[in-house]
Amino acid sequence: MSGAGPGDPRQTLGRRGERLAARFLERAGLRVIERRFRLRCGEIDLIALDRELVVFIEVKTRRGSGFGTPAESVTPLKQRKMARTALAFLAGRGWHERPCRFDVVEVVERGKTPEIRHIQDAFRLGLGA
């Protein structure tokens, strides 16, 4: 199976979900500082500040919940990749001592108004990450 290209409907859906999630988080008081942060070791959809806390956010967008909740698709492998990428981001900013957390935002499109659910502290950074 080939990767999603620019015209791929999944990529379009994912980007729309990221925009909706960013707006939702900003309304909740977070300040989004990075979008689609990518390194060789992985990627993080959104990075935000919640006061002094650095929040690394995976956004999962679906058209329905027929395959389980979107958050269920954030596998342990994805979590490890996010953790490695987060550590590199923190090191690059000189933020070694900044507290952080890993969140998931689910965006489920059903009808005209998408349902958005923010799961704070969805998983923890393990020492073996």
Image (cartoon, grey):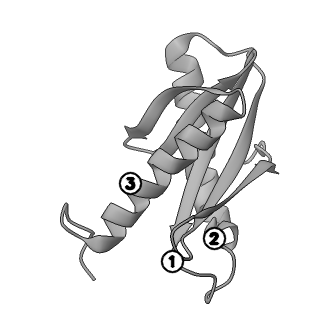
Residue 32 is left or right of residue 4, and the answer is right
Residue lying at 68% horizontally and 83% vertically, measured from the top left:
68
Earlier sequence position, callout 3 versus callout 2: 3
Q: Which residue is mark 1?
A: 63
Q: Which residue is mark 3?
A: 15
> Badge 1: few (under 14), some or many (20 or more) residues near its Cα, within 10 Å?
few
Q: Residue furthest top?
A: 94
Question: Residue 92: where, in percent of width, then height?
Answer: 49, 17
> Badge 3: few (under 14), some or many (20 or more) residues near its Cα, within 10 Å?
some
Residue lying at 44% horizontally and 45% vertically, measured from the top left:
41
Badge 1 marks a residue whose secondary structure is loop
Find residue 110 and name its label.
none
Question: Residue 49: where, in percent of width, then height?
Answer: 66, 23
Q: Which residue is mark 2?
A: 70
Type of amino acid under label 1: Arg
Type of amino acid under label 3: Arg
Front-most of 38 and 6?
A: 6
How far apart, in angstroms, are the residues tagged by discs 3 and 2? 15 Å
